[in-house]
Image (cartoon, rainbow, N blue to C red):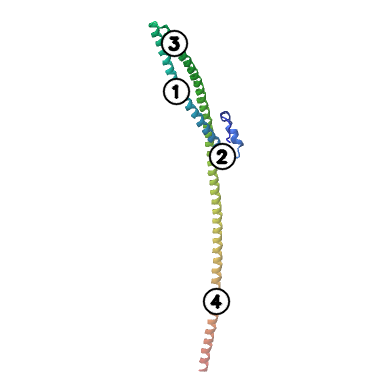
Amino acid sequence: MGLFSRFTDIVNANINSMLDKAEHPEKMIRMIITEMEETLIEVRTTAAKNIAEQKTLARQIKSTQNSVDHWHEKAELALAKNREDLAKSALTQKHKQQAELEHLHEANTQLDEYLAAVQDDAMRLQDKLNEAKRRQEAILRREESAVVRLKVREKAAVHNIDEAIGRFERYQQKIDRLEAEVEAYDLTESKGLSAQIDELAQNDAVEQELAAMKKQTVNA
């Protein structure tokens, strides 16, 4: 079942109020527009049938008017020939055609009024449909704007995360450099101590050799 039960419901509907109360306005507006478009097709189909019927009625009116004129001429001809009996019969046929012609004119007048009403309904429905489509465009623009804002915020959040990670990595690299400097210092310090010890050993050897040379000199 659709949102609306009849044409009057559509043209009198408060679209803004309906959408404000809807849980999913974008779905509701699509349903409203679909039903309006379907109803508008029905109204225009009815109008097309009425226009076709009016054209048929116009041909019938013209044909009946020709019959009225035809029997009137026949009556005049019969009267001119002193055939009052035939003239009377012709006038009888003329009156029948005149009655039919009046009936056709009445039907045409009613059809004109009905067609005007249908055309007015179609215009009112089209206006309501245009209103619904404008509201749909507004909803879509709001939705697109919200999506864009969300993407911007998500991008900003990712940027902040990347920046934080970058700062952490730079801090880690700084720590790595400091640790490397400490290790290099320790390594340098260790080499210096070893060299000093080696130097002491070398000095002992020199002293021993010097003592040996002195002893040889004394013995000689």
- Give the distance between the C-alpha atoms of the residues marked 1 and 2, in whole angstroms: 44 Å
Rate crowding at label 1 as few (under 14), some (14 to 19) or many (20 or more) other CA atoms within 10 Å: few
Residue 194's tag is 4
How far is the residue under mark 4 from the one under mark 1?
Answer: 124 Å
Which type of secondary structure does the marked residue at label 2 adopt? helix
Q: Residues within 10 Å of mark 2 (few under 14, many from 20)?
A: few
The picture places residue 208, in percent across and down from the top left corner, at 54, 86
Q: Residue at x 55, y 45 (%)?
A: 150
- Residue under label 1, please give it: 56
Q: Which residue is mark 3?
A: 89
Question: Which marked residue is nearer to the observer: mark 3 or mark 1?
Answer: 3
Secondary structure, mark 4, is: helix
> In this image, 184 relative to 87: left or right?
right
Three-letter residue code for mark 2: Lys
Q: Is residue 115 above or below residue 148?
A: above
Q: Position of residue 27 (x, y in %)?
A: 56, 39
For mark 2, what is the residue?
27
Give the secondary structure at mark 1: helix
Q: How far is disc 3 from disc 2 in space, using C-alphas?
A: 71 Å
State how far apart marks 4 and 3 are (Cα).
153 Å
Choose mark 3 or mark 2, whichever is in front.
3
Q: Answer above or below: position of 171 versus 4.
A: below
Judged by depth in the image, the label closer to the viewer, 4 or 3, is 3
Closest to the observer, 71 or 131 = 71
State if disc 2 and disc 1 touch (CB < 8 Å): no
Please tell me which residue is depicted at 52% across the width and 94% down the height of the picture: 219
Q: Is residue 171 above or below residue 96?
A: below
Q: What's the amino acid at mark 1?
A: Thr
Q: Which mark is residue 21?
A: none
| Residue nearest the observer in this picture, 88 or 47 | 88
Q: Tell which residue pokes out farthest to the bottom in this image.
A: 220
| Sequence-earlier tag: 3 or 2 | 2
